[in-house]
Image (tube, rainbow, N blue to C red):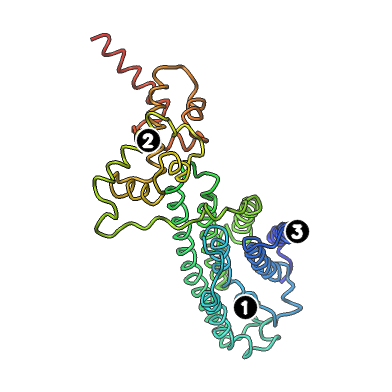
Amino acid sequence: MGINIVPTVIYASMMGMTCFALIDVLSRKRQQQSIYLGVLLLLLLAHILGELFIYSGAYQYAPALAGMQLPLRMLLGPALYFYAIATMSPDRQVNGRAYLLALTGPLLVIVGMLPFALGISSADKLALANPATRDPELWQIAFMTCLFATIAFILFTAAYLVVTFRLHARHRRQLMERFSTIEKRSMDWFRVLLVLWGAVWGLFALDFMMGFLGVRWFGSGVVLPLFEMSVLMVFTHFALKQPILEESDKAEPQRKPAKTYALATEQLQQIANKLSQAMKQDALYLEEDLSLKRLSDAISVSENQISETLSQFLNTNFFHYVNSFRVEQAKSLLLSTKNQVTSIAYEVGFNSKSTFNTAFKKSTGFTPTGYRKHQTVQSSDNFIH
């Protein structure tokens, strides 16, 4: 019943890290994105304090508080989702219905904990920590409460992680309909962190149940807290660096007609010709941050009409359409010059080597370097034969 030193130190470090992040958030201008990030950090802090309460042995002095963090933990998934809405959705406001739905998780756990919270005295709760002094009937109540809270947390949080993934996917999709460069707007770091948070909370729930049953594994108290601290560190780093996205960066994707074109086929063909001319003759694709609005102004065609032409007539989107011309120009430069791949990527309009490599390989099946080598070998073989 003493102090578990290693996890206590880890969670104490996490508490300090979270507090510093909260101070940073509170010092910023009051905006929806900052508000929801602050709420999420407060909930993480409550979770961390709950772990410190157990690992530090403080529960011996206030056993009545054991498990009081469980209802608050149910709000982690909703808070992450609300932060995503404030950061990526064109409608930053969360309606009352969404708040009520989020509160059903904590309320459900509170109801499930009533037999444990009200039916067991503080002395009996403390006795449950020791197998030699625990009452079997009270232990059964505690176990069922733990099992119920864990299953509720897994299901409730998983549901919110799924809808948050969908929100991010929709955000990324609409960027590809309006911009040729999306790296600074797409928040791809957030998608990775969603996976990591899901892994942390899933493992935490599993470890919580195993610990309650007295089962220890190599990750208990050391590996899992370190993993959780690493994810928290990475999340706070990127979240605090994330700028406020403009409304134009978060507009809803263009709606596609279900069965028929809004424009006649002849009009779609005319717009397609204008688009081709703007790319091939005017070389607009060389503009690093070419947008749908910029292209619309250049060819005097509305954004909606361009989007319909791209999606319905050319079976593509703005992002892939522009980058296809960039890749074709890059192929030419790779064979006609000895310039470095990175230099060519920036020269043809890409603003990152990783995006260039991805687009190039998707188009040709080769990396830029591999394509250059392959074509050189092919040319040599043709020359010999």
Count numbered badges in the picture.
Answer: 3
Q: Which residue was labeled with disc 1? A: 131
Q: Is residue 168 left or right of residue 361?
A: right
Q: Earlier in the sequence, mark 1 or mark 2?
A: 1
User: Label 3 vs label 2: CA separation?
Assistant: 44 Å
In the image, which disc is placed on residue 27?
Answer: 3
Amino acid carrying label 3: it is Ser
Location of the N terminus (image quadrant): bottom right
**Which quadrant would residue 42 be assigned to in this image?**
bottom right
Residue 170 lies, in percent from the top left, at 44, 57
Which of the two labelled residues, at mark 3 and mark 2, occupies the earlier sequence position?
A: 3
Position above or below: 307 against 370: below
Would residue 92 appear left or right of 4 to someone viewing this image? left
What residue is disc 2 on?
A: 324
User: Residue 227 at x, y = what percent?
Assistant: 60, 55
Is label 1 or label 2 in front? Answer: 2
Badge 2 amino acid: Ser
Residue toward you, 264 or 216:
264
Q: Is residue 357 above or below residue 341?
A: below
Q: Label 1 sits on what residue type?
A: Pro
Q: Residue 43: which numbered mark, if any?
A: none
* Measured Cα–Cα span from mark 3 to mark 1: 48 Å
Between circles 3 and 1, the one closer to the viewer is 3
Judging depth in this view, the residue of 320 and 165 nearest the camera is 320
Q: Are marks 1 and 2 in contact (CB under 8 Å)?
A: no
Residue 235 x %, y %: 61, 54
Q: Residue at point 44% right, 55% down?
A: 169
Residue depth check, mark 3 versus mark 2: number of the one nearer the observer: 2
Q: Dot 3, how many residues are within 10 Å of its Cα: few (below 14), some (14-19), or many (20+)?
A: few
Q: Residue furthest bottom?
A: 119
Q: Residues within 10 Å of mark 2 (few under 14, many from 20)?
A: some
For the point 69% across and 81% down, the residue is: 126
